[in-house]
Amino acid sequence: ETTITTTQQPQTPPDVLVINMSSPFTAEHVAEWTSFGPKLKGKPTPEQQVAAKERKAKCTEMKKRLVAELNDPNWTEKKIEKELDRLAEEGGKAAERPEYLDGPSGTRDFYPPEMKVQNWLFDKFRETAKRFGFQEYDAPVLEHVKLYERKAGEEIVDQMYNFTDKEGKHVTLRPEMTPTLARMVLNKTNLQTGEVRLTLPLKWFSIPQCWRFETTQRGRKREHYQWNMDIVGVDHVNAELELLAAACYFFSSLGIGPDVVGVKINSRAVLEAVLAKHNIKKGQKDEDGGDIFAKACVIIDKLDKIGGEAVTELLGGIGANAESAAD
């Protein structure tokens, strides 16, 4: 017996706005446009000036891309900007479909073509890791919030997809993998003697999906995959050298050389020594009891984002003299 089932197209619900379809832009276009941030008004701060330049560059890049995609002389960069501003002002209602047909904010769908590319890239990750003797591991995407509070303090909870489950447990979608790795190793450790019941060193790798409840923007979403390679049980620099060698091999396997990608090594110890030469020492407090060293680290971390002049000005604001701040 053959059964043929037909479905009737649903009528548009009364609470769904149907817009004028003369606009070629979708909700994704509007979301990307608004992710660049609003136009600045009034006298901007140094950081706002840098942000304004970044916004202008992103807007220009998007307009040029849309001009090429539309391939319509009627849609100039100026007209595209005006239309996107209008749609953004109206709340980004640039699609006639209901909201639930889009994935939650900051997430992605992987159709077969995108999945093919992802599988290819992940296979490259695995090939490199196994060539260097690493073993793959995984763990539940759901973890206890306490695991992350112990690592980074309670402030990290603000960036997590955390909730209380039906059993009253405070859980979260994992924001990163390192605490999970530590938990798994501790579960194979005698907590009284510190002896690890596994053969050291451990060389493990993973490609987890991680979640952070952050402001979404192009290239930065709320869920992402990351390739982790960890070595446990080696107390000298050889572990770092091996990981750097693996990373270089990976890029080489993709045909990407030093003319395209460089390796930068971060060292808190070196930063402490440099700042100490300029009378900014670890544990030093300002008039309000704040940690000057910690504030300086946060400011210096913004160097690539806001530029040297802005960093110099901010360092001066926490008490560093002009010469030291410029250095």
Image (cartoon, rainbow, N blue to C red):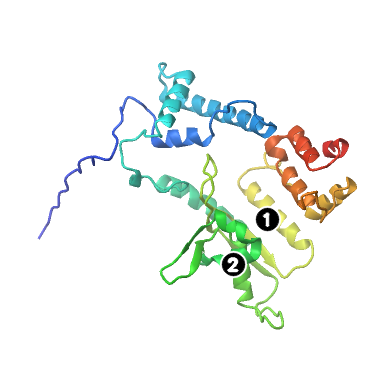
> In this rendering, would 135 be left or right of 15?
right
At a point 42% along the width and 19% down the height, the residue shown is: 75
**Amino acid at circle 2:** Leu
Q: Position of residue 205 (x, y in %)?
A: 60, 62
Residue 162 visible in the displayed image: yes
What is the crowding at mark 1: few (fewer than 14 residues within 10 Å), some, or many (at least 20)?
A: some
At a point 88% along the width and 45% down the height, the residue shown is: 278
**Amino acid at circle 1:** Ala
Q: Split into 4 quadrants, where in the image is the N terminus? A: bottom left
Instruction: Decide which of tag 2 and tag 1 comes sooner along the chain.
Output: 2
Residue 120: mark in rendering: none
Q: Position of residue 47 (x, y in %)?
A: 67, 34
Q: Which residue is mark 2?
A: 147
Residue 2, quarter of the rendered image: bottom left
Q: Nearer the viewer, mark 2 or mark 1?
A: 2
Judged from the image, the secondary structure of the residue bearing numbered disc 2 is helix
Residue at the extreme left of the image, as rendered: 1
Q: Is 18 in front, or is 253? A: 18
Residue 151, quarter of the rendered image: bottom right
Residue 141 visible in the displayed image: no
Q: Which residue is mark 1?
A: 246
Q: Is 72 in front, or is 286? A: 286
Alpha carbon of mark 2 to alpha carbon of mark 1: how far?
29 Å
